[in-house]
Amino acid sequence: MIFENTGLVGLKSDLAFLDEVAEKTGFVRWQWEYYRATYEYKIEDTDSHSEYYLRMNTRAVEGKLEKPHAVLEIEAVYMGKATFPHGLEYETPIPSKILNTANTKIQQFKAALEA
């Protein structure tokens, strides 16, 4: 599922500040390479014992990721359900309580990034 109109797509920040905001709001930078990084937040559904991951893709528009002053731009915000043994399913309907949590996290991240 792709989140539209989050206000995050197109925002830019240096890597050090983006990592700080991510840590404050519970996101982790897992996947990364020299020019791209994915920040994610895990949401567990206690009713179904399923896991969902809220993800933000970023791309370096200035510098490379190993430099704290590299500037990253947020490209997409999306969510998927974890599948066994690993991977995400993006077409599965997401329960409303999980979507509410995701939307809250998106707004917390945006507010912290713009502070």
Image: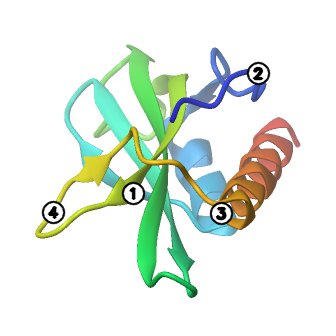
Decide: marks 3, 1 in contact (CB < 8 A)? no
Quadrant of residue 86 in the image? bottom left
Q: In the rendered image, which residue does mark 2 sit on?
A: 5
Q: Is residue 65 above or below residue 4?
A: below
Measured in 3D between alpha carbons, the distance from the residue under mark 2 to the one under mark 3, in whole angstroms, is 18 Å
Give the mark nearer the N terminus: 1 vs 2.
2
Q: Which color scheme did the rendering employ for the protein?
A: rainbow
The image's mark for residue 98 is: 3
Mark 2 element type:
loop
Give percent across and percent down for residue 114: 84, 36
Tag of residue 81: 1
Q: Position of residue 36 (x, y in %)?
A: 31, 28
Look at the numbered discs 3 and 4 and tell me whether their residues touch, using CB distance below 8 Å. Answer: no
In depth, the one of 84 and 41 nearer the eye is: 84
Tag 4 residue: 86
Q: Residues within 10 Å of mark 4 (few under 14, many from 20)?
A: few
Give the residue type that dot 3 points to.
Ile
**Residue sitting at 78 percent across and 41 percent down?**
110
